[in-house]
Structures are given as structure tokens and as C-alpha cells.
Amino acid sequence: MIRVRFVSADGSETREVAAPEGHRLLEVAQNDGQPLEGTCEGQMACSTCHVIVAAEDFARLPKASEEEEDMLDLAIGASRTSRLACQILLTPELDGLTVRMPPQHRDMQGR
């Protein structure tokens, strides 16, 4: 099992969950009730699963593709350590990963 820590946008709440290796961070976050929409269902056609990876964990992630970088340009509040949760596959190297929810997000479903 891979441990992941989710930090709320304002930093007031942290939850740690364990997920099986090979699961996408987006699915793990949604199953935990985190506010990630994932409108395109992981097809990298939106930026609604944008997360901010802890600076100390960012280098452990595989490099973002050019397509992911383009989608991150559309994310509200993107930072230097932003990634799309649909593009992060949990591996043993990512055990203990910490991600923060962005301060705001685009509601593509109009809810």
C-alpha cells in the first residue's frame, strides 16, 4: 500500500490514506472525498484534478508530459509544483506523497 497525505486548500486539515500500487492519484483522492472534479475522467482534457505537490516530494514524480504542462497552464492557482492527479500513478517510490488541494478550481460540470 502507498501512503498519500491530502492537505486541504487552507492547510487546516490533513488526511492520510493508503492505496494500492498502480492506482491513479485522482481515483484515490475522489474515493477519499477530496474536492477534485476530474471532469474528463483522467483523459487529460481538463485541469479539474490539479493538485499542488509538496516541494520536497515533487522531484520523486516522473516528469510531466508536454500535454500535461499545457493543461496545467489552464489550472487556476497553478504553481511550480502543480500536477494533474490523473497523471500520477502511485508507485512504491511515491510512498508518503503529500499533495495540497488548490485554493480554487474550475467547476466544469456547473455544480
Image (cartoon, rainbow, N blue to C red):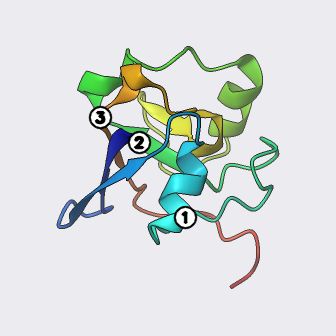
Residue 40's place in the image compared with 104, above or below, is: above
The amino acid pointed to by label 2 is Ile
Q: Residue at x 50, y 33 (%)?
A: 90
Q: Which secondary structure, mark 3?
A: loop
Foreground mark, 1 or 3, reads 1
User: Looking at the rendering, which quadrant does residue 59 occupy?
Assistant: top left
Amino acid type, mark 3: Ala
Residue found at the very far bottom of the displayed protein: 111
Q: Which residue is mark 3?
A: 54
Q: Is residue 32 above or below residue 48?
A: below
Mark 2 neighbour density, 10 Å: few (under 14) some (14–19) many (20 or more): many
Could you tell which of marks 1 and 3 lies nearer the N-terminus? Answer: 1
Residue 52 marker: 2
Amino acid under disc 1: Gln
Apparent side of residue 38 relative to residue 81 in the rendered image (left or right): right
Q: Quadrant of the C terminus?
A: bottom right
**Percent x, y of residue 45:** 82, 45
Measured as percent of width and height from the top left, residue 41 is found at: 77, 55
Element class at badge 2 = strand
Marks 1 and 2 in Cβ contact (< 8 Å): no
**Mark toward the start of the polypeptide (1 vs 2):** 1
User: Contact, CB < 8 Å: mark 3 with mark 2?
Assistant: yes
C-alpha separation, residue under disc 1 versus residue under disc 3: 19 Å
Left or right: 12, with 66 as reference point: left
Question: Mark 1 sits on what residue?
Answer: 30
